[in-house]
Image (spheres, rainbow, N blue to C red):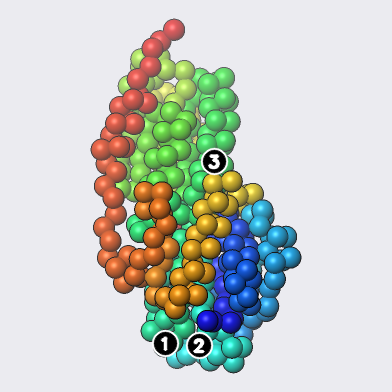
């Protein structure tokens, strides 16, 4: 049985990462396994920023946003020589296996470390929900709720002033934050990375609503598709609505994790520790139809993304309806 494991958080932070670390510590401690926290992700592994953490630390951070261990992106980790330094540091500390909580950018590192003799198990930690091997990722629910609250507020003021709004949300190249938030708030126009509308299409859709007398319109867009401020100007010019842009930005990454994110994080962490205790490595934990599974990292990298275009089309149709009073 292994005696010492490490845990790190990697890539963009996500609410619930602390709960994941706490879950790892608690589950390992119950099995008599010591846990070492690595500061700032793979960067800390390379620099030897490794410190023992315990159940008191776990309880203290469990409910907090961000990641207490810190996170970083380290492109150099692709180089074998850099990874070898990390492996040497782990071996020096007697750490035999590792839990990595992060987005798809962290997968390759976990796979390579496993090949170099350190069993790694990954936990899907990102607000983007872009990890195909898991139905939901740790942090998605919190970010989604932050977005929904923001859009509800924006709606209040747009409705008061008979205006339109362009709201831009994160997601990297995944439209789930936009799709779920647009569904939950009834946004009239939704454009996501996978089902992108042209600026002209957006303007035309808003114009039709303006001409029919709709009091307020919200255009919800995924990041990296448009310049939100310029798009708002175009919408205003074509539709006649005074139009304001809001880029929600990093407000979406912070905040106290929701109960669902904490639950997913802790149950996934318990499952990850089980994997390592059984000598399993090179796998990422994911939610598959409400059941936790551990999939080979190699196979998860080649899994196709679910096609949500039909779902988006349906929501667009439903949300564009209104009855003039
Ligand atoms: O992956 C999480 C995420 O917040 C993406 O939604 C976004 O594209 C990116 O990270 C932003 O990264 P940074 O904080 O480095 O600007």
Tell me if label 2 and label 3 are in contact, CB under 8 Å: no
The earlier-in-sequence mark between 2 and 1 is 2
- Tell me the quarter of the picture where residue 67 sits: bottom right
Q: Is residue 178 visible?
A: yes
The label number, if any, that marks residue 183 in the structure image: none
Mark-to-mark CA distance, 2 and 1? 8 Å
Mark 2: few, some, or many residues within 10 Å (few <14, many ≥20)? Answer: many
**Residue 273 image point, x, y percent:** 52, 69
The earlier-in-sequence mark between 2 and 3 is 2
Label 2 residue SS? helix
Q: Quadrant of the C terminus?
A: top left
Number of dots carrying numbers: 3
Residue assigned mark 2? 87
Mark 1: few, some, or many residues within 10 Å (few <14, many ≥20)? Answer: few
Residue assigned mark 3? 145
Residue at 59% over, 66% down:
27
**Residue 16 image point, x, y percent:** 58, 55
Front residue of this view, candidates 62 and 197 = 62
Tell me if label 2 and label 1 are in contact, CB under 8 Å: yes
Q: Is residue 40 visible?
A: no
Nearest to viewer (mark 2 / mark 3): 2
Q: Compared to 155, does 212 lie above or below?
A: above
Front residue of this view, candidates 229 and 167 = 167
Mark 3: few, some, or many residues within 10 Å (few <14, many ≥20)? Answer: some
Front residue of this view, candidates 53 and 105 = 53
From this viewpoint, which residue is outermost toward the top? Answer: 325
Report the side of 303 relative to 106 (left or right): left
Nearest to viewer (mark 3 / mark 1): 1
Mark-to-mark CA distance, 3 and 1? 40 Å
Residue assigned mark 1? 116
């Amino acid at each position: 049985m292994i005696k010492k494991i490490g845990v790190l958080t990697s890539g963009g932070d996500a609410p619930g990462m602390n709960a994941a670390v706490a879950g790892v510590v608690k589950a390992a401690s119950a099995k008599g396994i010591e846990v070492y926290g690595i500061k700032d992700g793979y960067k800390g592994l390379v620099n030897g920023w490794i410190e023992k953490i315990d159940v008191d630390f776990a309880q203290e951070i469990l409910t907090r946003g961000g990641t207490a261990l810190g996170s970083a992106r380290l492109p150099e980790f692709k180089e074998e020589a850099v990874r070898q330094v990390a492996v040497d540091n782990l071996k020096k500390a007697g750490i035999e296996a590792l839990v990595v909580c992060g987005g798809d950018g962290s997968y390759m590192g976990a796979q390579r470390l496993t090949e170099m003799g350190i069993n790694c198990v990954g936990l899907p930690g990102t607000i983007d929900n872009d990890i195909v091997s898991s139905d939901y990722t740790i942090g998605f629910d919190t970010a989604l709720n932050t977005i929904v609250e923001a859009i509800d507020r924006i709606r209040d003021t747009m409705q008061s002033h008979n205006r339109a709004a362009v709201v831009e949300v994160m997601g990297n190249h995944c439209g789930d934050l936009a799709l779920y938030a647009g569904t939950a708030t009834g946004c009239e126009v939704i454009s996501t990375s996978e089902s992108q509308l042209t600026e002209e299409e957006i303007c035309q859709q808003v114009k039709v609503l303006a001409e029919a007398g709709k009091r307020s319109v919200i255009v919800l867009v995924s990041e990296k598709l448009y310049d939100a401020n310029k798009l708002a100007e175009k919408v205003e010019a074509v539709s006649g609505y005074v139009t304001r842009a809001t880029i929600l930005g990093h407000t979406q990454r912070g905040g106290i994790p929701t109960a669902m994110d904490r639950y997913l994080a802790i149950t996934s962490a318990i499952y990850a520790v089980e994997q390592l205790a059984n000598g399993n490595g090179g796998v990422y934990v994911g939610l598959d139809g409400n059941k936790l599974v551990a999939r080979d990292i190699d196979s998860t990298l080649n899994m196709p993304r679910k096609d949500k275009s039909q779902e988006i089309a349906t929501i667009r149709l439903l949300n564009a309806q209104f009855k003039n009073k």
